[in-house]
Image (cartoon, rainbow, N blue to C red):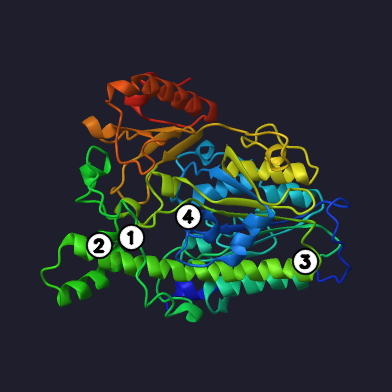
Amino acid sequence: MQWTQLIALIIASSWAACISAPEQNTASTKQPNVIILFIDDLGMGDVGFLGNKNIPTPHIDSLAAQGVELKMSYVTNPPCSPSRSCLVTGMFAQKFGKFGMARGLPIPEDHPTIAEFMRDAGYVTGQIGKWDLGSLDQGPHQRGFMEVAKWAPGKAYNKGGRRLKGFNNDAITDEALAWLEQKRDKTKPFCLLLHPKPPHEPYLPAPPKYKDYLSDVTIPEPATLYDDYKGRTPEAIQKTMRSNLILRKPSFKKYREEIRKQNPDITDKEMLAKLYQIYIKGYYRLVKSVDDNVGRVLDYLDESGLTNNTIVIYTADQGFSLGEHGFYNKQWMYEKPLHQPLLIRFPEVIEAGLINDSMTNHVDLAPTLLDYAGLPIPEDIQGYSLRSILEGNAEQVRDTCYYHFYSHGDDNLPEMIGIRTNTHKLIHYPGMKGKYQWELFDLVNDPEEMQNHYTNPAYQDMKAELTEGLLKLIRDLEDPVDAPNLVKTVLP
């Protein structure tokens, strides 16, 4: 069985005391506890409360029923590392430079993490699961976290640790529950970041419990699975692109060979149909494991009397493509990879079952938690506290989404810079040529993003408005953009 799925590497805190103390269950009497369930590569169409009818996800759905759904939450830079940086700092990763997949670039020392703020305010803090923000020696322990799990042995940025055998998500949840019950100081509030690896690939081997799950069914295909990208930027690189296409997914090479051996004359469309079923079933098996372990954490809170005074946040490091446009990954600024799930539950304080339409971002989580913990929000934090919209005192904190994807460790995907409003989206590809440099989508009339309106005369006023808004975001966020055809002049 493959180590990325089966081994969780944990550095255990040597100084976290095990103190038995009665715990209250009243949200108004003390600083709230915090658990952030930060799932890797779990998108907007993957669970029941978001409309997925292919698999049941009762535990995640229960969070939606008991808390607030922030339905317009968007990623600003899709690879794993920058999203995690946004979460723990409240700062856009662009502030730290060209932050792509570079795990060797940790958070600068002069930018504190939420754990450092909360630890100084009396919290015990833990991070268990995927870190992905530089060397362990330079990162988590020095950034305020008491325990850290690693996920990629043999890499320079992930030295040290001890191994826990077993399926990744189960082992990490075991460790998290042991920390909550045995290792933390129960006289203090806690802030725990729980970051499982699944449903990040590889999708096989499956969790033992779900080895044969869905094997006897056919999952319905997305309407855009066989997209030809006519008039849009992927059209220019679809024959060389590997990093997103299910049809050319590198880890599916053996499946393609097996399928072609049995069907020598198979067409690309027929091959894609078969590969989609392999992909989506493997993915869903991991999602089921995620839901099971979310349930274990929620059960612990109930059984320990901690539910009412614990803020539970469920989100992911970005959205994810589940075959839409033939894609399987997290890049491109299209809706499925752009749109990340976000639920927040805080019984007795936040009304259950609310849905809010404000645009939000991972940078908003740190100031939100500082606000609820009664701590001042530093002036240089770029996120907004969501407390006002969670408690129904405001409708929104932002009305645009900014996006800048730099790279994914190869040259198969172009750089992308864009803005999304409630109704439209403008994307610029500075490395592309001619008509493939720009896309403009009308999300109200074309939610599947099949029609590029950038050169459509009817959309010229909207194009100007979106371009102006995008330039303003670049300036406000101090993003080091190098895109002459967008900027025209050097940004101040």
Residue on which disc 3 sits = 184
Q: Residue at x 54, y 26 (%)?
A: 476
Q: Residue at x 41, y 74 (%)?
A: 214
Q: Amino acid at mark 3?
A: Arg
- Is the residue 104 above or below the residue 402 in the image? below
Q: Amino acid at mark 1?
A: Glu
Q: Check whether the beta carbons of the residues at disc 2 and disc 4 lie within 8 A of each other.
A: no
Most foreground residue, 72 or 89? 72
Residue on which disc 4 sits = 43
Q: Label 2 vs label 4: CA separation?
A: 21 Å
Whichever of callouts 1 and 3 sits on the residue coming sooner in the sequence is: 3
Residue 134 in the image: x percent, y percent? 53, 54
User: Which is closer to the viewer, label 1 or label 2?
Assistant: 1
Is 26 placed left or right of 448 in the picture? right
Element at label 4: loop
Residue 168 in the image: x percent, y percent? 53, 72
Q: How packed is label 2: few (under 14 Cα within 10 Å), some, or many (20 or more)?
A: many
Residue on which disc 2 sits = 272
Q: Label 4 vs label 1: CA separation?
A: 16 Å
Q: Amino acid at mark 2?
A: Leu
Asked which quadrant contains residue 220, the reply is: bottom left
Residue on which disc 1 sits = 221
Q: Label 2 vs label 3: CA separation?
A: 49 Å
Is 61 placed left or right of 373 in the picture? left
Q: Residue at x 66, y 51 (%)?
A: 353
Q: Label 1 vs label 2: CA separation?
A: 11 Å
Asked which quadrant contains residue 272, the reply is: bottom left
Q: Label 1 vs label 3: CA separation?
A: 46 Å
Element at label 1: loop
Q: How packed is label 4: few (under 14 Cα within 10 Å), some, or many (20 or more)?
A: many
Most foreground residue, 455 or 471? 455
